[in-house]
Amino acid sequence: MGGDAMPVKRLSLLALLLALAMIAYMTIGSRGNWDFVLAFRGAKLLAIIAVGVAVSTSTLLFQTIAQNRILTPSIMGFDALYVLIITMMVFFVGGQGMLSLGPYGLFAMNTLLLLLASFLLFGTLIFEHGRDLTRMILTGVILGTLFRSLTSFATRMIDPNEYAHIQIASYASFNSFDMELLYIGVAIIIACLAFVWTIRHRLDVISLGYDVAINLGENVRAVQLLALAVIAILVSVSTALVGPVAFLGLLVVSIAHLVTPSPYHSTLLLSSALISCLILVGGQTLMERVLQMSTPLAVVIDFVGGLVFLLLLLQRLKK
């Protein structure tokens, strides 16, 4: 009874802190026309929350199907693959040709290509070597390095005037995003979250281990494929909106396991999403409104998240 009440209390506290952070973000330093301020900041707040939820959910799903708490889509090279796809499109069709697709067409093509690449590269890797942590990490690092090297090689042969399209996609920014893509991105994220919520009990079974899940009658391959498809879509949406944030997912999911230690995805999904949004909204408020610093929040998050990754890796290696 007490164990069931504790996650609810902590989730409620996280929700309260997030609400306070959202109010601070919308009100601190606001001057002039409130209609304009609320509409402008409201759109940015919506984008931040959408990215926070997408990153936390995709990371938790990836850790579940990979059956370890160190790997994330970013560490395995998902973000680098997305930037590589953008680079190859600019290389072959040019910046104007890419823009002629429009934000919706460009997003649809990127998502489709990322889905195909995810099944071919990461799906095979998880199915064949999912329980070999060392091989998974090394392969992920190698794939990420390969994608970034190919991106760097292609950018050297691209017209410098068209390099701006790649540069925008390569760096995370919570201050600029495509308004046309925001609402469709939010709709896609909500659809993905609704689907993930329907399979949360199956994810609980998968997290018990491959052999246990098989013995309990769960179709592990089917769940892994479904989760991988959702991960690719969520990574596409979050990266298309603000750019890649490498270690945010690892950071928030690690904190979620500490704050709300639970074997159930119903708790972890909510906890990691609230923590992710709290870090992004609170951090952006602090950096932009209080300290008035121009340093991108993504830089700070990647620094702290990188330290968390090293600590988790060293802890796992000691075992």
Image (cartoon, rainbow, N blue to C red):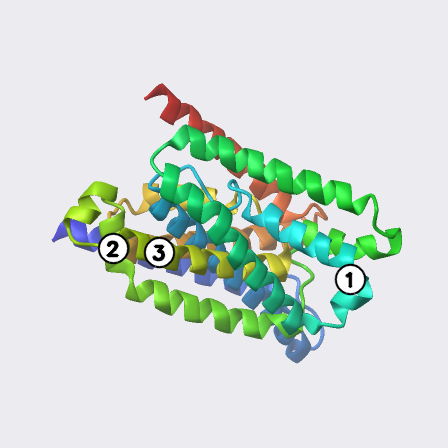
Task: Decide which of tag 2 and tag 3 comes sooner along the chain.
Answer: 2
**Residue 137 spot, x, y in % from top left:** 47, 33
Indicate the quadrant where residue 274 lies.
bottom left
Q: Is residue 230 left or right of residue 7?
A: right
> Residue 269 got which mark?
3
Disc 3 marks a residue whose amino acid type is Leu
Residue at image coords 70%, 77%: 33
**CB within 8 Å, label 2 to label 1:** no
Please name which of the two marks, 1 or 3, marks the residue nearer to the observer: 1
Please name which of the two marks, 2 or 3, marks the residue nearer to the observer: 2
Indicate the quadrant where residue 141 lies.
top right
Disc 1 designates what residue? 93
Q: CA distance from mark 2 to mark 3?
A: 22 Å
> Residue 113 got which mark?
none
Disc 1 marks a residue whose amino acid type is Val
Tell me: residue 43, above or below residue 313. Answer: below
Disc 2 marks a residue whose amino acid type is Asn
Q: Helix, strand, or loop for circle 2? A: loop
**CB within 8 Å, label 1 to label 3:** no
Disc 2 designates what residue? 219
Q: Is residue 111 visible?
A: yes
Tell me: residue 73, above or below residue 96. Answer: above
Residue at image coords 62%, 66%: 109
Q: Residues within 10 Å of mark 3 (few under 14, many from 20)?
A: many
